[in-house]
Amino acid sequence: MFTCFFVDDELLVLESFMHKHAFFESGFINIGFSTNSLDSVNEILTVMPDVVFVDLKMPGLNGVELMDELKQSGYKGEFVIVSAHRDFEEARRFFTMDGFDYLVKPVSDKDLLMLLSKLSDRLSERKDKRKTNGDTPSVELNKITAYLHNNKTGKHTLESIGKTFHIKPNTICTLFSKHLGTTFKAYLTRIRMEEAARLLLTTKKSVKEISFICGYDDYFYFCRVFREFYSCTPTAYREDTL
């Protein structure tokens, strides 16, 4: 399934379009909508949908301006303009900025199904590429995970990471759950334990040194966590594997 977010300042038009059966039929689900283009920026950056369907002519930010704002903020999803206006200049800007497609209202089911089929192919390719690179659709989450991998010795908490990246702890929890299917604590423990195992097998450092390198001041707590993760002590892991 692919996720959609809809932005249109006319609520009735918005509801009519986003409830079209073609979306569900093609494997697209609605995870949010907004009638305020300015407010939609933060909402979209929070839920990180695969595609944003946006009206062209709106108060505040028009569709192309909204797209530009989101791209500058790190959003890497697709955009589809849905408009009753055939504005050549705005359409040109939209495609120059790598917009996916431009639908003219009223949108027929046939046109929508054709677009969703092409969009599904594009999104599938992008998801496969992200899996290969180890990335998620969330720019914020990718930054957090990269930071954790590069700073394993830090005394990280949800609150400290929230302050570093200016993100609410609850939002961080949601990102880990939605995109990685785990918790912040479990993810941090896993990368620390994987690093500990690597150091045990590739260096002659003592278990106490490795404990500190992996962010644990308490040697005994480190050994307990390691045993829970690998079902053996660090010393046994090193002796049994080498």
Image (tube, rainbow, N blue to C red):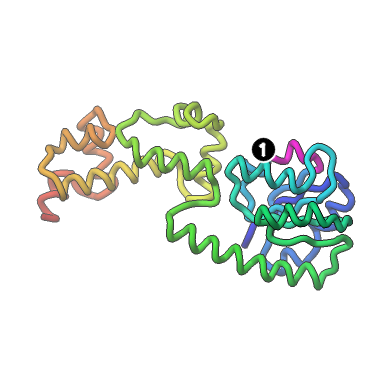
Q: Nearer the viewer, residue 162 or 79?
A: 79
Can you say whether 158 is above or below 10 in the image?
above
Q: Quadrant of the N terminus?
A: bottom right
Judge left or right: residue 4 versus residue 133: right
Q: Residue at x 67, y 53 (%)?
A: 97
Judge left or right: residue 188 versus residue 73: left
Q: Which residues are magenta?
A: 35-41
Can you say whether 195 is above or below 160 in the image?
below
Can you say whether 113 is above or below 50 in the image?
below
Q: Quadrant of the C terminus?
A: bottom left
The image quadrant that residue 25 belongs to is: bottom right
The image quadrant that residue 212 belongs to is: top left
Q: Pointer 1: residues within 10 angstroms few (<14), some, or many (20+)?
A: few
Residue 129: x percent and y percent? 49, 61
**Which residue in the protein does label 1 denote?**
42
Judge left or right: residue 105 versus residue 25: right
Residue 206: x percent and y percent? 12, 37
Q: Amino acid at mark 1?
A: Asn
Q: Residue at x 28, y 47 (%)?
A: 194
Residue 99: x percent and y percent? 69, 56
Q: Nearer the viewer, residue 113 or 19?
A: 113
Is-magenta flag for residue 24?
no
